[in-house]
Amino acid sequence: MNEDEIFHLFSLAVASISLLLLALIFVVLVQYTFPVINKMGINYFISTSWNPVFGKEEYGILPYFLGTVLTSFIAILVGVPVSFGIALFLTEYSNKTLKNYLGTMISLLAAIPSVIYGLWGFFIFRNFILEYIERPLYHYFGGLSIFSTTPTGLDFLNGGLILAIMIIPIVSSITTEVLEQVPTEIKEGIYAIGGSRYDVVVHGSIRYSKNGIIGAILLGLGRAIGETMAVSMVIGNATGENALPKSLFSAGQTLSSLIANEFNEANPTSLHPNALIGAGLVLLIMAVIVNLSARMIVSKYKR
Amino acid sequence: MKTKIEIRNLNVWFSKRQVIYDVNLKIPEQAITAVIGPSGCGKSTLLRAINRLHDLIPEAKVKGEVLLDGKDVYKDDPLAVRRKIGMVFQKPVPFPSMSIFENVAIGVKLNDLAKKEKLEKIVERSLRMAALWDEVKDILDSPGTSLSVGQQQRLTIARTLALEPEVLLMDEPTSALDPVSMKKIEELIVNLKNDYTIVIVTHDMRQAARISDFTAFMYDGKIIEFNETSELFRNPKEEITEKYITGRIS
Amino acid sequence: MISTISLRVKKKIQNTFLFLFASLSTVIAIIPLFSIIFEVVKNGIKAINLDFFILLPGPVGESVGGIANAIQGTLILVTLASIIGIPIGVITGIYLYEYGREKKSTLISFSVDLLYDLPSIVVGIFVYIVVVSPMHSFSTIAGALALAIVMIPIIAKTTEESLTLVPSTISEAGIALGIPKWKNIIFIVLNSAKSGVLNGIILAVTRITGETAPLIMTSLGSTFWFSGINKPINSLTLLIWRYAMQPYPSAVEKAWGAAFLLLLVALALNLIVKSGGKSK
């Protein structure tokens, strides 16, 4: 064996660590989830009760699954249009310098640690949305079920909006990249037949880059699903029946915030840790599915 | 004149496409041999077959023999072959993030050919031979990329010379340069022939005529004609050679 | 005539709408950035004094003490994680670049991608099961391992990308000097991609410095100094998370102070990466 072959084997061995880790993570999580599914059966996925007290143990993760879905949905609903607007502003209305500065600023949003978003969300943003969004909506539209809970500011809406802010950097940067790849001929073609900038964007750019934008949205969704700390600080930390989304203003819990909030309190001899690990497994599967589809779409688009 | 490299029945394929057909060539020692021909005729491919650079490309297949002093390079250690047969590329490629000194010393260093104390001497000698020493002796620590393109090309020549090769392969070494730098490199090449066997691929016929002792004309992957340079240009034996050197095909 | 005018008006309105939408979106995204920076600086600076940097946290609820053990903890965790994660990440990146044609490498590249996408709290759970549980103790090394796992795919991907950007002529020139392939990859190609690889490393370090979730169930947090890699350890992020939710103003103030420090480091490292990327 010559030195190049040794290097080849050595680097292969080191690189295989990632494969090994991934496989182990999956296997170990499945293994530790098994006992709780064994006891709860299908109820683990569809029940709303959550009781770690010894002798009365019951674990159903449906509310937290729905919490993850709802907060991620709010994040996409709010974060994607804003990200798209930013991408438009950078590609259509900015010169190089402005684009550079704004791009850097938006990307700084991604550099802020998640726990700081949580701190800000808990003390600052909470008051803002309580005062200017939740109370007015509750006052005027409290009859609608989605606004029907007395607002506290620590709820699904806060969690979802924080996530919206957190996904803006990734969604907007990929959307910008995608919009930049729209060929000038397509844009000029529309201008040439008397189209306005609006026509160019709506009938040219968006149509041309549809797939790329969908990929960007999915990547944002992947980020939102896995995000933990910020949400755990602003979502109100309800458990069991109470965590079911009743309105935007009700306190709740996501799969990841549940794990963060309860893991250290779980008695290792009970099924409580297993129930939380199972929540992690569901989270893992959701994240993998979403990110895989995003990757497939984005990479196909890039080619 | 003694033959330094003998190429026997050389064929090269990329995937299924054959680019070199049955080339036979005797390259004389301590002389400049030019390989000319229209672009795409396989002259660079031929050059790269001599120091086994095709080994790197999985799709490339080489058949035939390349004898260096009578010994087939394809039966030798490829690393040793490449040290004995140095190569200068079309575009100068100084290694970025390395100083001028490091650029020259790196080959010697990574091949464990000399102790540290000797490096300085080797670098100075190589730079002198490449006619670059006087221009860079005070800025040896500056990045190699800070030099002009012409200087960079002489730097890569110095880098190759540092390994004390026996043969120098040059793949259109002046085509990326301005006329002044080109002239400098040509003078350098002529000087180097006293110590080295040089094979230069060029699309510039006048360059071949100016500096080479022998010229091979290649067309469609075959050597059409090989002769002393003056003879080949004055008295081409093949019609197609004549057409090429008179500019009727390119 | 009338229809042309109304069409022109319609287009004008559409264009104005588009511009307003684009610029408003940009403003909406930048407001939180400034608000976060402003609030963290405003509230954090109050907590900063000498004690803050050199003392252990005082008893809960009393406004004495500092966050020195959290600073120490973050430094130790990030250093240990880097020692484990950087070499593995870089070598994985080299493998993916150099042997990317192999069948095996597709699988490895796929795993690196998936590892990159994993929610970091899942990594924490994993390390809890394989390290904390058998050791019967939360520990510094468990936290460092979790952070290293978060680092590896980031560094592997950026290393591979930076290597791909090195022109093939450079690698070829090295090979033509008779340099063995592996030395050529490390001392010529990797060396040429140095700034990109370094950027990836800084990016990964920034990311793990701000990580909280995988530390909750691995290094746990602590109110003491570091006392061995088999013992729990504090970190800035864990401190912020725990203190922010406490009912005592003095604890909340420390959380803001820690956030100030953390934000400063995160933004500084990020701007280094940005400027490094531009100079290339």
Image: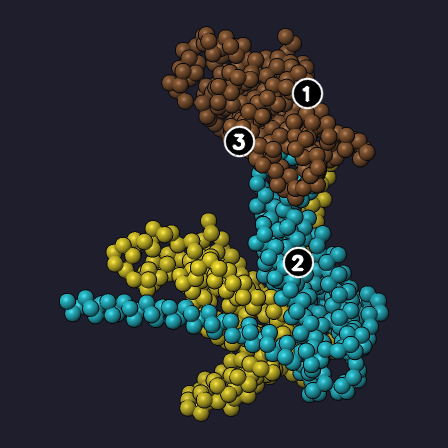
Q: What amino acid is at disc 1?
A: Glu
Tag 2 secondary structure: helix
- In the rendered image of the structure, the colour used to display chain C is cyan
Residue at 58% from the left image edge and 54% from the top image edge: C277
**Label 2 crowd bin: few (<14), some (14–19), many (20+), radius 10 Å:** some
Q: Are marks 3 and 1 in one subunit? A: yes
Res. B177 mark? 3
Q: What amino acid is at disc 2?
A: Ile
Label 3 close to label 2 by CB (< 8 Å): no
- Residue B60 at least partly seen: no
**Residue A31 location in percent, x, y?**
67, 65
Tag 3 secondary structure: loop
Give the labeled residue for mark 2.
C202
Q: Nearer the viewer, residue A142 or C62?
A: C62
Displayed quadrant of residue A239? bottom right
Figure chain in yellow: A
Chain designation of label 2: C
Chain designation of label 3: B
